[in-house]
Amino acid sequence: MAGTDSSIKLDLGPSPVVILCEPQLGENIGTAIRAMANFGLWELRLVNPREGWPNEKAEAASTKASHVLEKVQVFERIEDAIADLSLVFATTARKRDMNKPVIGPDLAGNRMHGHIQGGQKTGLLFGRERWGLNNEEVALCDAIVTLPVEPSFASLNIAQAVLVLAYEWRRASREGEELPFSSSEGVAADKKDMVRMFEHLESSLERAGFFTVEEKRPSMVNNIRAMLGRANFNAQEVRTFRGMISSLERAHERERKGNNDKNTPAEISE
């Protein structure tokens, strides 16, 4: 989905912190940054990234999300990366042998939004590409967030997991707001224009011999009007549709005139 508009000012308001534990590939960090930027998250913390930081591959994969790149922080321990947060969710697809609340991404989004509204900081902890988070790392968190994935294929790419959780936070924090844009369907056609369109079509169909059984004509007309009425034409679409009818009528007239000319006997010159 393309649609980046660099002329729109970024709103770097309070949002969840994303913590990536020992990410292995710069490309994965970069795509996670892109996912964060898509939904208004901007604070990323890395714990012992294997390829170090800064990382050219991460920068290339982030698709110019410089406002996130410039604020990345690097830590040696998860304990330090989450020290200033009062609510942290561990993301995992595996069942853990511990007494820890397990919630879905929608509830996590709602809880993060409420927590941030209360002036507190919250974070999302994501594990390594190969095996995710250790139990000791999950134990540091307040709850587990897991997705309703297919059990036989449960592993998500880091960026995918970040995207889902970032979306859910954005949804919760923008509850009731309109989408960025709506359909450009124009002004709805009024009934007068719709009736004229119906009558134009029915007249054309009449001349073309469509209504072959007169007693069935009323029900056929009603069906045609009901069918076209479900399309919710706007004013421009009515004009376009009537133009199509007129074009077909003119083509039919030209064809009929051509056939008549062929059937006219040629004059005999003396």
Image (cartoon, rainbow, N blue to C red):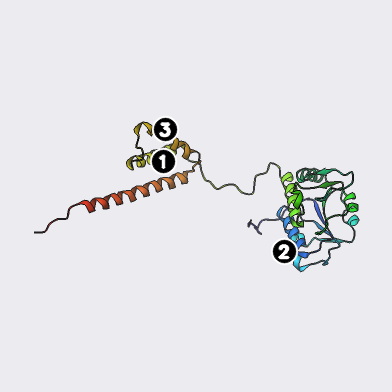
Q: Residue at x 70, y 55 (%)?
A: 38
Q: Earlier in the sequence, mark 3 or mark 1?
A: 1
Mark 3 lies on residue: 219
Q: Residue 60, position in %: x, y? A: 72, 66
Q: Residue 228, position in %: x, y? A: 47, 40
Q: Is residue 207 above or below residue 155?
A: above
Mark 2 lies on residue: 61
Q: Residue 88, position in %: x, y? A: 85, 49
Q: Tag 1: residue type?
A: Met
Verify CB contact (< 8 Å) between mark 3 and mark 2.
no
Q: Tag 2: residue type?
A: Ala
Q: CA distance from mark 3 to mark 1?
A: 18 Å
**Label 3: few (<14), some (14–19) or many (≥20) C-alpha neighbours in 10 Å:** few
Count the labels in the image.
3
Any part of residue 43 in sight: yes
Image check: 21 left or right of 36? right
Q: Residue 209, position in %: x, y? A: 33, 41
Q: Secondary structure at mark 2?
A: helix
